[in-house]
Image (cartoon, helix red, strand yellow):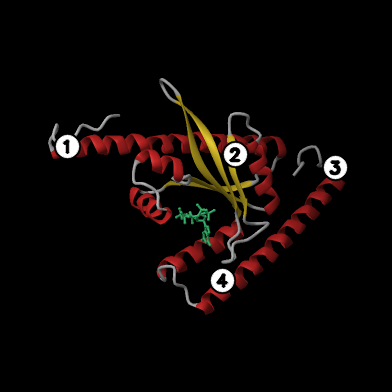
Amino acid sequence: MKIPATNEVSLPARIEVERRMLDRFMLRYELALQEIGARIEILRREFASVHEYNPIEHVSQRRKTPESIIRKAHRRGCELSLDSIGTNIRDIAGIRVTCSFSSDIYRVASMLVQQPDLEVTEYKDYIESPKPSGYRSLHLIIIVPVYLSDRVDRVPVELQLRTIAMDFWASLEHKIHYKYSGDVPRKLRDELLEAAEDIDRLDRKMERIHREMRDVKILNGDAEQDSS
Ligand code: 0O2
């Protein structure tokens, strides 16, 4: 859409045009979230029905606010145009899937990655290699096709997958980070790192118990229902 030159239209009319352009820009991310959300829901329901087991505990999604997009664009030194933002900021749309066990994270990710019309452009495994803060999650940037009236728009969505325990840690750490405007005291940072390691141990223990239960089920002849 062409923006009329400043001398051709009044300021309110120009603001209105820009507002519509922003709405249209943001709409593609909302539609991409709807699309990927529907695919995750299909996987969740089908998996639960076939395997009598639900690997997905919770799904949430968010679009970055225009303020947060502008902050990130500034941080990245990215030009403040919709084209440049669309190219350089890949996590305007984000969907978070919380799973019961670490193995479920990789299972859900692989079920999505195998869908032929989804393209994975980034794969960051912060479970294998946690961030220095202790943060653990699997992050994927997935290009989602959005079928519009006259074209297919290919929209990036950041998919974050984590366990309930990782999510518990990340939400507390996020609050603390926000409260201290990023300048978290050393003692608290050390405690958070320690808690992240405790959580990792807990996740591994829960995974082991889960496997033992599965083995007991197989011994009891329930293997047909539960291949988890
Ligand atoms: P929000 O509110 O979740 O949207 P950058 O986004 O520039 O920091 P990059 O490389 O684009 O870096 O993305 P990265 O680091 O792979 O993932 C960024 C997102 O992961 C963050 O989004 C958080 O959601 C989450 N994340 C990453 N590191 C941490 C961490 O140490 N603690 C917590 N609690 N979350 C983390 P946003 O946009 O920062 O926030």
Q: Nearer the viewer, mark 2 or mark 3?
A: 2
What amino acid type is highlighted by mark number 1?
Thr
What amino acid type is highlighted by mark number 2?
Val
Residue 162 position, x and y percent, is 60, 53
What residue did someone put label 3 on? 221
Residue occupying the point 43% across, 24% down: 148
Is residue 153 rendered to the left or right of residue 214? left
Asked whether mark 2 lies closer than 8 Å to ligand 1, one says: no
Q: Nearer the viewer, mark 2 or mark 1?
A: 1
| Nearer the observer, 117 or 163 | 117
| Placement of the C terminus among the 4 image quadrants | top right
Residue 20 position, x and y percent, is 27, 35
What residue did someone put label 4 on? 192
What residue did someone put label 1 on? 6
Q: Is residue 164 above or below residue 59?
A: below
Residue occupying the point 44% across, 34% down: 31
Residue 135 circle label? none
Q: Looking at the image, is mark 3 or mark 1 earlier in the sequence?
A: 1
Alpha-carbon span between mark 3 and mark 1: 75 Å
Q: Nearer the viewer, mark 1 or mark 4?
A: 1
Alpha-carbon span between mark 2 and mark 3: 38 Å
Asked whether mark 3 lies closer than 8 Å to ligand 1, one says: no
Q: Nearer the viewer, mark 4 or mark 3?
A: 4
What residue did someone put label 2 on? 120
